[in-house]
Amino acid sequence: MSYFIHKIFNDLGLADINSGNSDNINWYTSDDTIQSISPVDGKLIASVTETTHAQYEKVVEKASDAFLVWRTIPAPQRGDIVRQFGEELRALKAPLGQLVSYEMGKSYQEGLGEVQEMIDICDFAVGLSRQLHGFTMHSERPKHRMYEQYHPLGVVGIISAFNFPVAVWCWNTALAWICGDVTIWKPSEKTPLCAVACQKIAERVFKKNNLPAGISSLISGNYKVGEWLTQDTRIPLISATGSTRMGKLVAATVGARLGKSLLELGGNNAIIISSDADIKMTIIGAVFGAVGTCGQRCTSTRRLIIHESVYEQVKIALVKAYKQLQIGNPLDQDNHVGPLIDQEAVKSYLHAIENLKSEGGNIIVQGGVIEGKGYESGCYVKPVIAEASNDFSIVQEETFAPILYLIKYSGDVNEAINIQNNVKQGLSSAIMTTNLREAELFLSHSGSDCGIANVNIGTSGAEIGGAFGGEKETGGGRESGSDAWKVYMRRQTNTINYSLELPLAQGIKFNI
């Protein structure tokens, strides 16, 4: 083990073999393990034990019991626990960011940024813990009043993806905790160490406050472990992040038992570049959106819809920018692009390029797998730029890789909006323009059909204060800011009669 890895492990409490099953007090081991292989160098980082079904049952029982205690603690006090968790994250930002970078393959700066998102959502949740407001309403009955309130929901199951191995969990967890819920986390089997590290941080906070086991639980394994969660009637809400295919299975399973689903699925995000765009600003946003995290963000920029009057100018500027990209170890801050997550992702990338060629796409920045010293993992690929048509089947799909499609439009911005909306996904979108009318049309009822619509900022990334999520095959769920907290609670309407009579609804007479 290198000194670099040894220090990370020491700071985060990791070992060569780690338990992947915890109820925030107890850790349970098994014989079967998940090997965490870094896409950075192809080396084994460490192993994590898989959760058995018996261990899963124990975790759910602990969580159910813990909920009965946790829900009775006043929300501001729950908020203080989240505040303490955020402070722990601040202290461990560097090693956790390094682990994210090394295990997932995103740049160190992006790894730090992801941990910062965790800190930010904790700060947001602390304030929110004093603002779980209901409403007061007027009753149609004399001497009656009505109000609406929100109660804790119960056990929340969280299924997260490899591309954001810590932030998405925290978005859900911080809100669920202040709402009075307890959580069970099933992370991606591709990034299990990040999950173990986060659970150990949470464990310290709950132990310090003498809180029971089961408020924050971790289970590890493949899709079968996730199925235990989705099929479990004891878990009223499943928050799942991943592919559209996975989301449809989750929705069907949870829906069959009339549970609630919060789904964050695929994105096929576009930037419209109008004739009135600031080209320099556009190139910065488009390049980062397309190659950041090696194109493995749900908000990654997949399509540029460019007005014919600036098309050649944008194309030339993009090609020039791509020539300057440095590809290599993401922990080296001189590099812009790290690896794909694994060999399967590389195969998908190569398959997409072949499909693009077969449909008549014109590749203007060539792709391929990079070999040689420093690229031994086989996961490093060249970002691709291709001229394409929006109706190509490969353009209609989401390829989790740095492939950017250039699509030309003519006429007014309505044509560009129609092209943008003509995909099955509806997560993030943007327009680059200095024309106020175009910007306002893009944000109007007749504009973007995505959950996120930006003006003069790219598709990639989101602020904590806003609700994050998308429409259509993105799943419709909302996480993080605004009133996203409401999905983690159950809503109740209350009517109080302070009169001496019992008037019935609609003036019905029922005399006894």
Image (tube, helix red, strand yellow):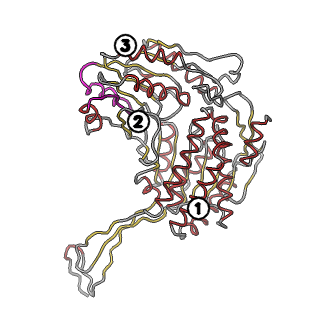
Query: Residue 81 shows which numbered tag?
Result: 1
Q: Are marks 3 and 2 in contact (CB under 8 Å)?
A: no
Query: Residue 312 shows which numbered tag?
Result: 3
Marks 3 and 1, Cα distance to the nearest angstrom? 54 Å
Marks 3 and 2, Cα distance to the nearest angstrom? 25 Å
Looking at the rendering, the stretch of residues picked out in magenta corresponds to 410-435
Tell me the quarter of the image containing the N terminus. top right
Please say if 358 is above or below 118: above
* Of the pair 342 and 178, the residue shown nearer to us: 178
**On the image, which quarter does residue 61 sit in?**
bottom right
Marks 1 and 2, Cα distance to the nearest angstrom? 33 Å
Give the residue pinned by disc 2: 428
- Within 10 angstroms of label 3, few (less than 14), some, or many (20 or more) residues? few
Secondary structure state at the residue bearing disc 3: helix
Q: Are marks 1 and 2 in contact (CB under 8 Å)?
A: no
What residue is drawn where x is 55% and y is 51%?
231
Please say if 257 is above or below 395: below
Q: Amino acid at mark 2?
A: Ser
Q: Earlier in the sequence, mark 3 or mark 2?
A: 3
Secondary structure state at the residue bearing disc 1: helix
Query: Residue 53 shows which numbered tag?
Result: none
